[in-house]
Amino acid sequence: MFKATIDANLLKDSIESLSVLVDEARFRISPEGIAVRAVDPANVAMVSFDLPASAFDGFEADDSEIGVDLNKVTDILGVIDKNEKVLMELDEMSQKLLLQIGGLSYTISLLDPSTIRAEPKIPQLELPAEVVLNGTDLRKAIKAAEKISDHMLLGVEGDVFFMEAEGDTDRVRLDMPRDQLIDLKPGDARSLFSLDYLTDIAKPASKSNEVTLSLGLDFPIKINFAIPNSDGKVGYLLAPRIESD
Amino acid sequence: MFKATIDANLLKDSIESLSVLVDEARFRISPEGIAVRAVDPANVAMVSFDLPASAFDGFEADDSEIGVDLNKVTDILGVIDKNEKVLMELDEMSQKLLLQIGGLSYTISLLDPSTIRAEPKIPQLELPAEVVLNGTDLRKAIKAAEKISDHMLLGVEGDVFFMEAEGDTDRVRLDMPRDQLIDLKPGDARSLFSLDYLTDIAKPASKSNEVTLSLGLDFPIKINFAIPNSDGKVGYLLAPRIESD
Amino acid sequence: MFKATIDANLLKDSIESLSVLVDEARFRISPEGIAVRAVDPANVAMVSFDLPASAFDGFEADDSEIGVDLNKVTDILGVIDKNEKVLMELDEMSQKLLLQIGGLSYTISLLDPSTIRAEPKIPQLELPAEVVLNGTDLRKAIKAAEKISDHMLLGVEGDVFFMEAEGDTDRVRLDMPRDQLIDLKPGDARSLFSLDYLTDIAKPASKSNEVTLSLGLDFPIKINFAIPNSDGKVGYLLAPRIESD
């Protein structure tokens, strides 16, 4: 069984953090909360999502796994007002999920979890540098870079975190010294990433005051933050691109 | 002769209540006010519109009939500021309508009323159930249903008014018991309607605090409400669709 | 050398006043400020732009000429917040322009000025009538005219400035007597202009409280105004169209 009540905005933010990478996801439900591990179709990025029972206004669950069409839930949540509560209840027999929001009752069919790509194993990486910054700063630099290139360099030089994009003739760079960051653990770090993915990930990240980036030398980047107004957390792992020059 | 002054927003709302069904309309003008009866090109919905002389800031008219291109008036009203007054004056000789709004003078050619579909006869229907609710509640349920289906069931079960839409795998339902409604006259009522039409009609209806629905068993629905901030009223009659299952 | 600091909004407004007519422009830089003279590709309109050194928060320059891709700068300025300062610095060796805005550093390649159309000679015209009005009034009349036609008549009749557009069947006219204008110098004036150009020019002009129109009989129109919050000024010269009837 699964029956839970959650703030509509928190559910929206949670679904968005997944839907930037995948259309369908396996939700692993347990008495402790909900967990999702998913990898994007191109195998470039992974997301690790954890929303503990304490993030809900009410939460009762056994162990189970359900397959969710994220776009369908996004559509439904698009209609509702902010600050409403969403009651979710699983009908295990019919494999349907009931959503009750402000008088409206939605019954949506779930997907067979076995038809959804299996949970990836999230690799344990030791990354030398760590940067903690405001999500809006991250997004601003990424939006600036999009005007110029389709990939972006992130790295640490001494006590300065930098983001840099280079087009055929133009260049944009953001230098953030330690005093403009929330925290910095210096280390040897410089890797190139696809702006398509960074843009998608920056959308949910921009709502967080504190985003932690872990970086290495031509290594994947870890982008971790808490889901706003909750005990939930999201982590992305994004593979680097090869610097051609 | 016809010469009248009206609040620009009230004129906008009036035109919108017609333009959701038809592009051109015959306006029947008399000393008592303006009346329009029109049926949509597919013969699925009718509108009955009455704006009495008292809804205007000034109103002088003989009996006459004019043909109006509604899109043209909508375009013109799109430019003006809220809370402006519109002076309308008919030039019978040239069959032109003069609109004066905030210093701007528009002269628009009228259509020959005989080229516009004749006024329909609005059938008198005795419908057993009646529901009075807030226009925004109606619109919310309709918007939710659009995500899932292209038609929607409306009906009364005991003391509960319900709206329900069913897609291939999903379902949405809004139950409104008597205490969530402004008024309810119970009766045997359950009919299916096209969401295309309901969506269009819900747009002007959503601006009204009090929308009256009259319903029967596989019968047309009547949707009546007052034009906000006026003595005017609009009524729609929408034909049901056949429930296939 | 060229090194200057300017308010981001002022730079945006400046670039917009040029980009409504051309995509690329030659900026003539001198110790006195920046000047641009450009003509649109169809030879219908010219712009004359002057931003004196006093409009900048800081300004140091020798005489030089640079070629700027206006769309690129518009793109970059689209990312930044209002009220930020932009530091611009020319690297003459590499022919690159450095823009520093809120921590972000942009390096953009300049265009070879010789590849951009030469500066036009702005003709000296004696136009009999002059009208000074609020930019928003001008824009409102132009937006109203767009609904009806693709050209617009501007003129003076006695002590009244008028704007008029005529479609196949409809007509819109704005009469502004002297008391609705900031100033009026009556004179023999009536000329027809393309609404495409008027619409583009009205966009930057609408931000100015005081726009001066100089008009004659089937003669070009001069549209002059100050760049808001600065000592800068912009002037357009727009060729008339032939009235066919």
Image (cartoon, coloured by chain):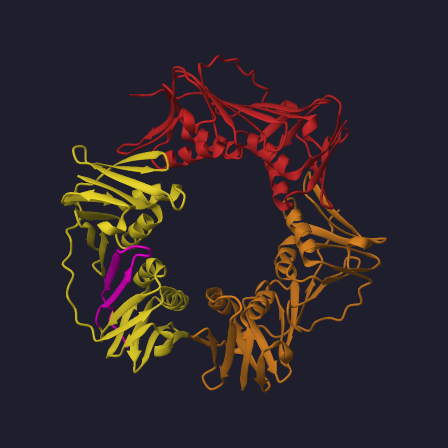
Chain colours: A orange, B yellow, C red
B50 sits to left or right of C214: left
> x and y percent of residue C52 in the render?
67, 25
Query: What residue do we see at 16% from left, 61% from top?
Result: B122
> x and y percent of residue A160 in the render?
81, 52
A132 sits to left or right of B62: right
> x and y percent of residue A225 in the render?
69, 66
Q: Quadrant of the N terminus of chain C?
A: top right
- Give the number of callouts: 0
List the single residue furthest toward the right. Answer: A158
C134 sits to left or right of A193: left
- Asked whether residue B12 appears in the rendered view, the answer is yes
- Nearer to us in this view, C136 or B238: C136
Among the 4 quarters of the image, the one containing residue C10: top right
- Asked whether residue B41 appears in the rendered view, the answer is no
> x and y percent of residue C107 in the render?
72, 39
Among the 4 quarters of the image, the one containing residue A226: bottom right
- Nearer to us in this view, B10 or A186: B10
Q: Which residues are magenta?
A: B219-245
Q: Quadrant of the C terminus of chain C?
A: top left
Query: What residue do we see at 68% from left, 42% from top?
Result: C84
Q: Is residue C72 magenta?
A: no
B119 sits to left or right of B159: left
- Nearer to us in this view, C222 or A200: C222
Q: Is residue B235 magenta?
A: yes
Is C171 drawn above or below residue B162 in the view shown?
A: above
Is C158 drawn above or below residue A74 in the view shown?
A: above
